[in-house]
Image (cartoon, helix red, strand yellow):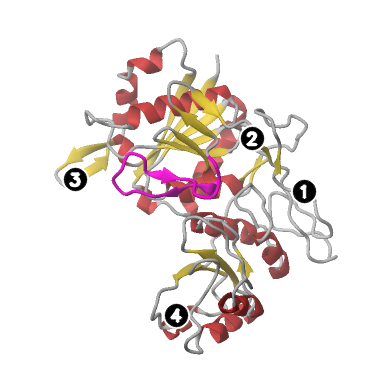
């Protein structure tokens, strides 16, 4: 029998009513799971629960918690056939993106799920999300970090939360679902990916240090994210699984809007800012009025800051240079985020900073797919 590890981090799925609103309660969720008869069905895999202490509201999840989740998976990797992470919905897509980069050489399913209505409520969506996630993890057809919610299995680093109160709370706007769940679990057979983790080198310097992956800086290692027309990942990929923990980095996000006063952001454009994601109009366009933004970006670039341009539009790709109002960003040293979500762009910046790469190497790899996170 397949055995799945359920990692319960907190979130709405296990909350109970209190005098101050819904809140997680230590020890409650294990008992609640034991009362779900379907989990005892012979068709279900075996499972064991690891409960975080303290339990977390997902709004409070950050780098430390991502690293903790990664360590739990790494420590238990050989003992289970797959992992289901129960997580609050607000930052679930951020965590899915982060884990997709942290879990190097992953060859087992890691499925994030949760619910919009607590399990203790009559109309909760938790039961189906838990049961289906366990079944998907046990089947092992998709061996990467995924997010399952409301009948859709999505690549984790392509997902984003699209509804605050709907039961179909997540979308994958720029990549098809890995599976759709109705009467059957219907996998999209051409989308199973074998990730050959690699980084694009930009110099002929000696080896790059500072990452658990031990990437070499003098060459381009094996092309990344080969898409194979097969339902099961390529077994020839034999890289041993390991964890790359994230280091703390100063990363910001600026959303462009009509009438924005760029000078308000000048105080953060210092040498202490490692990376910034610009959420621009359309395919990467910025306002042409005023003269504050481009000098500010150039100054950030000169300070060593990586400026990544993403689109505010859920669908579509940034194409710097397609319009005059975006070509200026390239001239100022910005890189294109392609069709990455903001969540994926932030996670990717954390990952590349954690490897101790040079600025040129980070810039090149921001525009290179490493985990199927985007098209460039």
Q: Are marks 3 and 2 in contact (CB under 8 Å)?
A: no
Query: Cα distance, mark 2 to mark 4?
Result: 42 Å
Q: Which mark is residue 301?
A: none
Give left or right: position of 14 versus 223. left
Residue 352's x, y, as percent? Answer: 64, 59
- In front: 373, or 206? 373
Label 2: which secondary element: loop
Residue 247 painted magenta: no
Q: Which mark is residue 223?
A: 1
At label 1, counting other C-alpha atoms closer than 10 Å, the crowd grade (few under 14, some 14-19, many 20 or more) is: some
Query: Cα distance, mark 3 to mark 2?
Result: 41 Å
Label 1: which secondary element: loop
Q: What's drawn in magenta, residue-wise?
A: 157-176
Q: Is residue 140 above or below residue 358?
A: above
Task: Name the quadrant of the C terminus.
Answer: bottom right
Residue 68's x, y, as percent? Answer: 50, 45
Task: Name the quadrant of the N terminus.
Answer: top right
* Residue at point 81%, 66% (across, down): 203
Magenta stretch: dominant SS?
loop
* Residue at point 45%, 10% (across, down): 42
Viewer-side label of 3, 4: 4
């Amino acid at each position: 029998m397949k055995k799945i590890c359920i990692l319960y981090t907190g979130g709405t799925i296990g909350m109970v009513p209190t005098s101050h609103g819904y809140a997680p309660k230590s020890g409650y969720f294990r008992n609640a799971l034991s009362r779900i008869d379907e989990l005892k069905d012979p068709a279900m895999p075996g499972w064991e629960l690891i409960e975080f202490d303290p339990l977390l509201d997902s709004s409070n999840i950050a780098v430390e918690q991502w690293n903790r989740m990664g360590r739990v998976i790494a420590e238990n990797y050989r003992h289970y056939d797959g992992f289901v992470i129960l997580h609050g919905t607000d930052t679930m897509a951020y965590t899915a993106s982060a884990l997709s980069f942290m879990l190097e050489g992953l060859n087992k399913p890691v499925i994030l799920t949760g619910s919009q209505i607590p399990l203790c409520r009559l109309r909760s969506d938790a039961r189906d999300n838990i049961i289906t996630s366990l079944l998907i993890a046990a089947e092992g057809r998709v061996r990467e970090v995924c997010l399952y919610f409301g009948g859709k299995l999505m690549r984790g680093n392509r997902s984003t939360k699209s509804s605050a109160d709907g039961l179909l709370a997540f979308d994958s706007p720029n990549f098809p679902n890995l599976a759709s769940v109705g009467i059957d679990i219907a996998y999209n057979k051409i989308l199973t990916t074998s990730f050959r983790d690699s980084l694009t080198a930009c110099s002929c310097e000696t080896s790059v240090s500072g990452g658990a992956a031990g990437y070499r800086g003098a060459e381009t290692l094996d092309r990344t994210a080969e898409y194979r027309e097969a339902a099961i990942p390529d077994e020839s990929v034999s890289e041993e699984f390991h964890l790359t923990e994230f280091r703390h980095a100063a990363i910001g996000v600026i959303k462009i809007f009509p009438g924005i006063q760029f000078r308000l952001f000048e105080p953060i454009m210092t040498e202490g800012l490692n990376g910034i994601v610009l959420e621009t109009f359309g395919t990467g366009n910025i306002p042409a009025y005023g003269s504050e933004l481009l000098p500010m970006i150039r100054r950030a670039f000169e300070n060593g800051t990586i400026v990544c341009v993403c689109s505010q539009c859920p669908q579509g790709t940034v194409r710097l240079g397609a319009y005059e109002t975006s070509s200026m960003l390239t001239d100022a040293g910005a890189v294109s985020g392609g069709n990455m979500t903001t969540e994926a762009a932030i996670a990717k910046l954390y990952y590349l900073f954690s490897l101790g790469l040079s600025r040129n190497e980070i810039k090149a790899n921001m525009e290179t797919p490493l985990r199927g996170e985007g098209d460039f």
